[in-house]
Image (cartoon, coloured by chain):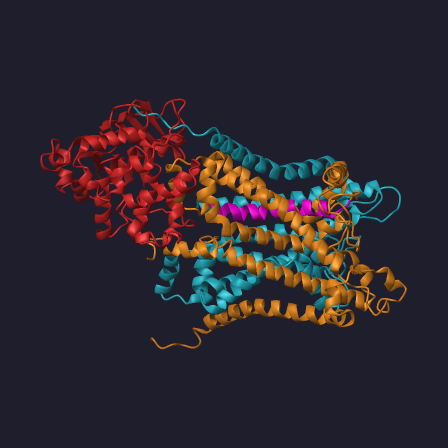
Chain colours: A orange, B cyan, C red
Amino acid sequence: MLERSPLRSLPDQVLKWGLSALAAGVLILIGYFFVRLIGQSSSAFSHIGVLDFFFRNNWDVSQLQQGAACTNGGHCTFGAWALLMGTIITSAIALVIGVPVAVATALYLTELCPRRARGPLSGLVDLLAAVPSVVYGLWGVFVLIPHLKGFQQSFANTFSFIPFVGGTVAGPSYFIAGLILAIMILPIVSAIAREVISTVPSEHKEAALALGATRWEMIRIAVLPYSRPGITGGAMLGLGRAIGETIAVVLVIGNSPTLGHSIFQQGYTLAAVIANEFGEAASTPLHSSALFAAGLVLFVLTLLVNIIARRFVIRGVRGKATSGEGLLVEIETEPGAAPA
Amino acid sequence: MTVLPEVSPRRRRTDKIMRGTLAAGTVLALIPLVLVIYYLIKKGIGAWSGDFFTTDPNGNFLGYPGGIKSAILGTIEIVAFATLISVPLGIGVALYLTEYGKQSKFANLVRYFVDVMTGVPSIVFGLFVYIVLVLGHVGGSGFAGWKGGIALALLMLPIVIRSSEVVLLLVPASLREAALALGAPRWRVITRIVLPTSLTGLVTGVLLSIARGAGETAPLLFTAFGAQVATANLGNQMNALPLQIFSDITSPRNEVVTRAWGAALTLVLMILILNVVARAVARRSRMA
Amino acid sequence: MIPRDTQKTDPAQTQQPVRDKEPVEVSDSPAEEQQDVSTRSQDGVTAAGHNVVLTDLHAYYGSVHAVRGVNITFPPNEVSAIIGPSGCGKSTMVRCINRMHEEIPGARAEGSVTLDDVDLYGDNVDVTSVRRLVGMVFQKPNPFPTMSIFENVAAGLRLTGTKGVNMRERVHRALRAVGLWEEVKNRLNEPGIGLSGGQQQRLCIARTVAVEPEVILMDEPCSALDPVATLKVEELIDELKERYTIVIVTHNMQQAARVSDTTVFMLDGELIEHAPTDQLFTRPKDERTERYVTGKFG
């Protein structure tokens, strides 16, 4: 009666191993993914040279049509320096604009805002994430670029002494792309910051208030230091998004493979180049391989950023610990007395 | 007699200024949302007409450029196909994580990479599917709607896994134990207890992942590729709303740009409805 | 009226009792000690110590009526203990004194709380300055986790712009006052949460003392501590009462008996009995008090 019947436990075994195989499939998929990308981009790396690909500023598709892609002084015309820099510049602008606003929003919503308004306002900020990137691109092209041109020019003129600011202003530019990216990363950075800030134990906030701190002083001495690792992680996740965002950027950055002299000039990013040149590249193996290489760099870059971000924000959605690692240790050691 | 110490004017001022700054930051964050919605309605609603939803883009250089029928149908078909793939797989992996893997090393590794996968740019998923399915001539050479669906499924998969795992973890352990103690095999516990209990939560997660997938352009660019004519055959090249908007933006013709706004309004409305429904489902399950 | 923060007497002079490290001995001459307290407050007033008077105090959480019309005076240089079963409103009442109660969403208080003659709920009163005069020690030791031992004690001082040597002096003095100096003097820059629970709680008391309040509220300050650490904190409370008005909430009747001069018994938000501690525990007037202190309650 009690012996194990192999037949009866069969469905259990099937389910168990089936589901395990599925889970393993996810890992295999990511690995396979990586291998195939490397395989496709290897020809670009071997022809162009890894260093030249990263550090040479000579992405020039027009050379291809003349059949001279790789004879130009021994260097192929797919040095991606300008694209790499474009990705870095636009992401940096996005962080500089987006993160302070996101953190301010998070602080306001968790610490200052009337309780009744908190839910609806948070919902509205989250709604920013529901707008598809192509719609942000559409809006950027037909609203942001024409409306901000005058502002950008006067800003560039006034602050021309700052490096990379002065000069003529193009319509599409690094700045516009960065601004759109800032809007796009805002909801995720803000959501993580909000969650992290709400894990600040009320004891710490009360300690500050009981010392006679004003609201802002409480935020400064009790809330911000405690949530800093988590907020940093959130900003890193935002950075990952900014690096990989394609469609909105390709529409507003101008897609010029030369490195602009100021943030108000046209540029290109790694992601944008893939979306923009894919059609024409299909017939040229080296060109498409160079695009795969750009994709590989993008993949590795976002992977790294995400891995680092996750060191700060452990298990974002998983509820209990949206907090930094240091924070987690504290949470674990908190009950009762701290370790002596 | 006691005198209350005065808070120095500097501290008062700093407090006021900083509160104001934080509030201003929140307003600033909401300005783009308001502006996007304002322009979508202002420019998009004009494009809407009976023809807009019932005709395909025609590619004519003059006159009415056609509507977005093929784009809407394409989006629905591609996303439905992507959902069909990502939901069973995603919930399966989530079940493995909560019911079998739990805190084992392997399960944590899977969790970690699923998390990392959410950060992979959508265009990279597109590239991957292009390499494997389009260049590899899998299931017919060239672009096809179903290949776009696979790219979207890859994108939605980690979202489904993560949201499902959170929901499955909410099923009280006591329920599982009660069923196991009655002698039910684990697979019956899962199908009879765990899944039904968490159904509404799973639906919420799925709806949100659909909303996310529906708005993506990059994974479709070189997989479904786009088309003018509506088709029910996933083996053909296929149009989708994001693709239609993307290609319309660069047109010099005002009518075509107007179509982009109309399509964008349609797409955002679809996504909003999905979000609202998802939230409503979530709220109902919380009340139950 | 001169803002208090900006007018500090020579710390070396005013803080004599504490620096002696033997405050118990100094307290042999209470008159002198009280003199000290009043000069410290720099108001040119002779009254020694500070009275806290609650008049018809009501406190609510939303629709829950947690404190129901309490009238009481907490006299200076005494420890007043508040006892009562959980949920009787004792913590709430105490949190009304430094207006921490209103920090809880939906909470409000009615009635009046005065410190000497100042209405703490007056129209032009800034809660920030109320809390500056009425310090608070919480149930769970709550040093700021990102700050060092030194910074923790200095946290309140920094807010008012105390800097440099002056601040260092006052931090050291506060650490001596809570008897923590010898234990931490060589690791002032280490994190405050590295200390043991008892040390953390004394660190929090030092942080409160450092800003030189007039009243110290303690909300079950020993409930998270082991017996040895509890004893130390109780000794400290005994020393501190020489200079402050102390109100302590405790669920532990032995503790109330050990540390307090007068004890208040509360039940269901009402003040049942307020008497010298000996009397309340040995000859309670109210039958409910008797049942509670003899453990027959409930």
In this picture, is A79 found above or below C261? below
Residue positioned 18% across, 41% down in the render: C25
> Would you say residue A195 sits in the magenta stretch?
yes
Q: Is residue A54 visible?
A: yes
Q: Nearer the viewer, residue C265 or B176?
A: C265
Q: Is residue B182 visible?
A: no
**Is residue A52 shown above or below C181?**
below
Q: Position of residue C46 (x, y in %)?
A: 25, 23
Residues shaded magenta: A172-197
Q: Is residue C145 magenta?
A: no
Residue A333 shown left or right of residue A139 in the figure: left
In this rendered view, identify the residue nearer to me: A320 or A266: A266
Residue B288: % across, % down: 44, 46
Describe residue B160's horizontal placement relative to residue C132 as left or right: right
Question: Of all residues shown, which one is farthest toward the left?
Answer: C283
Q: Which residue is at the front of the view, C150 or A231? A: C150
> Horizontal and vertical percent for residue C224?
28, 49
Indicate whether B104 appears above or below B277: below
Quadrant position of the N terminus of chain B in the picture: top left
Vertical position of residue A70 compared to residue B6: above or below: below
At 30% across and 44% down in the image, what residue appears?
C139
